[in-house]
Every structure is written in C-alpha cells, then in structure tokens.
Amino acid sequence: MPKNSKNGSGNGVKYLVPALAGLALLAGCMGGAKAPSMLQTHEQAGQSAVGALGQPAGSGLIGNLQGRRSVLPPGGAYAKVSDAVIHASAGAAEAELRVARLKANAQSKNWLPSIGPSVNLSSLGGLAASLLLEQALFDNGRRKAERAFASADVEVAAVSLSTAMNQRVFEGLSYYVNAQRARAQAVVAQAAAGRLQEFNAIMGKRVAGGLSDGSEQQVLNQRVAEMQATVAVDLQTESSQIAQLAALAGQPLGGISGLDALPDLGQSTAEPLAVVKARGEGARAVAQAQIQLAGLKFGLSATAGLDDGGVNPGVRLNGAGLLNPGAKDNIAALQQTGDVVDRQTAEAAETANRRIVSLQQQKANLASRRAQGDEVLRQTAANLDLFTQQYKVGRRTLLELVGQYDAYARLQRDQASLGYDMALIDLEIARDRGLLVDGARM
C-alpha cells in the first residue's frame, strides 16, 4: 500500500459526504431516475410508476383484502371453529408476507447512490482507500420497475396469505360439518336399529310359537345387522372428523353443535381470490418485463471515485452491448406483456365465475332434491302407517312391515345428509370469495 494511503483514506472520507450529496442532487436535477420524494412511502412510489408497458404497478390489492369481512355469524359454531384453527396456524404464509415486505422496503431505497470499493489490477494496494460512488441519472425506469415489482410481490404474498387462511378455515369447517352430518345420520340409524330389534323380538316369539319359520328370522337378523353396521360407520366417521378437526385446531373442540346460516353470496361483489391473485401476479409480471426492457436500452450513471488523489468524477454508460441483433424482437415481446396479463386475468375471472355458478347450481339441485325427498319421505311415512294398520289386522306380514320401515329409515338418513351438503357448498363459495376470514385479521 502506498505510504500516504492512510492520509488518502482520510481525504477520501472527508470528500465522501459532499460527493454523496452532490450525486443525489444531480440525480434529482437530471430527472432521469425520478427518485421519489423523501415523504413518499415505497408503496406510493411503486403505485406511481407507470412504465412503457402502460400499466400501473400498484393496484391496491392489500386494501381490498383488508376491507373484507367474514360472513361467519359472530359467536356461532362456525366462528368458534374458525378462531381455533386460525389460532393454531403455523403461519408460513404470514412469514412469506413479512419477507416480501422487507424486500419491498429494501427496494424502496434503490434510488440512493451505491457505494462500494473499487478494485483494479493496476492499483491493488489502494483497495482500502479507494471507494466508488455511483448514481443513476437515466435508467429507462429500471429502478421504478424494481420498486413496482417489490410492491406487487407484497400484494401477491398478501393474496396468498388470504387464500391460505380461508382454505385453512374451510378445512376446519369441513371437518366440523361432516362430523355433524355423521352424528345426525347416526341418530337416525340408531333409532332404526332399535326399532328393527323390536321387530326381531316379535319375530322370535312368532318362530317360537310356530307362526313363522326360521328363514324369516334370518332375513330380519340380516336387516338388523346391516342397520347396526350403518350406525357403526356413522359413529366412526364422526369420530374421525372430530379427531382431524382437533389436530387442525391443536385442541379438542367440545360443546359445539349445529349449522350456521350464511348469507347468499351469489350476487356478492367480493372478487374471487383467484382473480385477485391473477391481477397481482399480472402487475408483477409487467414490472418484471419493464425491468428487462430497461436492461435492453442504454442508461447513464454519474460516478465519483474517492482515492488518494481525492474525488474523480465521471460518467458511465450502462445497458446492452453495442451489438445485439435480437434486441428489437425482445423489446417487442416484452411490450406484449400487458396484453398477455390482461388476457390471463380475464381467463382467471371467467374460470372463477364459472366455478361459483356451478356451485350455486349444485346447491339449487340439492335444494330441489331435498324438497322432492321430503315429499317422498312423507308418502313413505303414510305407507308405513298403512302397513302397520294392515299388519295389525293380518293383511300384511311382519317381513313386509319390516321392509317398509327399513326403506323409510334409510330414506330418512339420506335426507338428513342433504342439508350438510348444501352447507359445504356455501362454505366453498365463501372460501373462493375470501369471505371466511376478516381481512383486518391479516
């Protein structure tokens, strides 16, 4: 190192502050880099960036998500399940959002001059005393695009967080609804099994008295066994769903029962999360294209080298090489990014809306099926009463009465399931629209 390297370092440091201030002021005067105001946040800086692709970088997606309100009735069974599963969440999506915000905060300072050591083979000894300050004067909007990309990345992470939380709540509520369904079906099956056992006891007396043969007893035994097996399946299903809900919530959830009525979301103005995410990813893709587009053009930077000799100002030309035959086509391709994004967002909206319409149609079909089933169940109950009266006067056999009752019980069990199918569809629509969790909680 030269003998005066120590003094040179002192001189370099002495010139560091004024050189830095001069470069920052120069960038503001040139107007090429268009550094944001010191009072402007990084999110505002990103939203103000409109590149050659003609689309704004910011789209206010986070505000849209935060303004959403859960459709789950406060204090109801659904809300209790939701609170439990959210509280037990591992928070991977939240961590990703924090990382994206930190990156965006870092990019918000990319308009400041860069400072670093200058190393060259002819002056290795001056490494400690040689610094290079560089400030972009004209970068074709690259740094704006980088801020816009970081802001869009935060928005995409926020949508991912909302999607993950809504999906988690939906899974917890699905376990709960299926457990409630299995419990309701088990109640019907248990009552039917008890009634069939009463018929079986009567049949046993008839066989013992010689009024019926053993084959009728075997048929009735089989019907009782089948209904008892149905009860066992329902109870096992309930136990399994409750166990999975407890695992998801991190604790058993007892003392909760019943279904909550949700509002009709068919005409809701809440945009499906899949569409919101497509728009956020589109804004990010536009910003990425703007960064690449800026890299294909020439830029200009002011430099100031600080070494033993003091400050050495200069100008640097940045960007693509002098010979780039494919640059024209690359630029044309990148300029089409906005159109591609618009089409992809439109397709995402069409797919999401078709899915919601399909779910609504499924619910309407289930409602119609339940209404028809209620009528069939009423007629079957009337026939059962008629069979009972005819059995008492000897016009029907006990097996005929048992067959009618078995059909009635199984229809009643199937009918009990339809309301829970409709409840799951309501939850699916709410999940797709991002309305199972309050946006303020995110």
Image (cartoon, grey):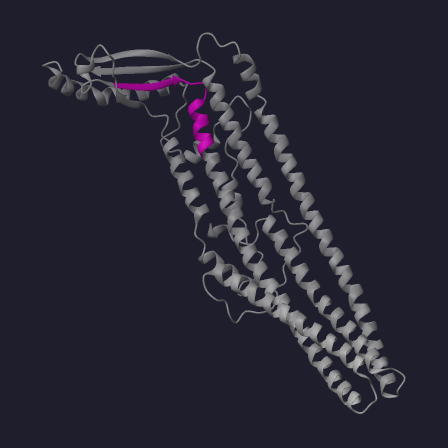
Q: Is residue 73 above or below residue 37?
A: below
Residue 411 position within the rendered picture, expressed as x and y whole percent measured from the top left: 76, 69
Q: Is residue 364 left or right of residue 289?
A: right
At 33% across and 18% down in the image, what residue appears?
A: 26
Nearest to the observer: residue 310 or residue 194: 194
Q: Is residue 317 above or below residue 421?
A: above
Q: Is residue 155 left or right of residue 224?
A: left
Q: Is residue 426 above or below residue 213?
A: above
Task: Name the image quarter holding residue 364.
Answer: bottom right
At 57% across and 49% down in the image, what residue appears?
A: 434
Does the image show residue 65?
yes
Query: Which residue range is magenta in the image?
Result: 132-150
Residue 135 position within the rendered picture, expressed as x and y whole percent measured from the top left: 33, 19
Task: Name the image quarter holding residue 129.
Answer: top left
Pick out the residue farthest to the bottom.
Answer: 209
Does the image show residue 50?
no
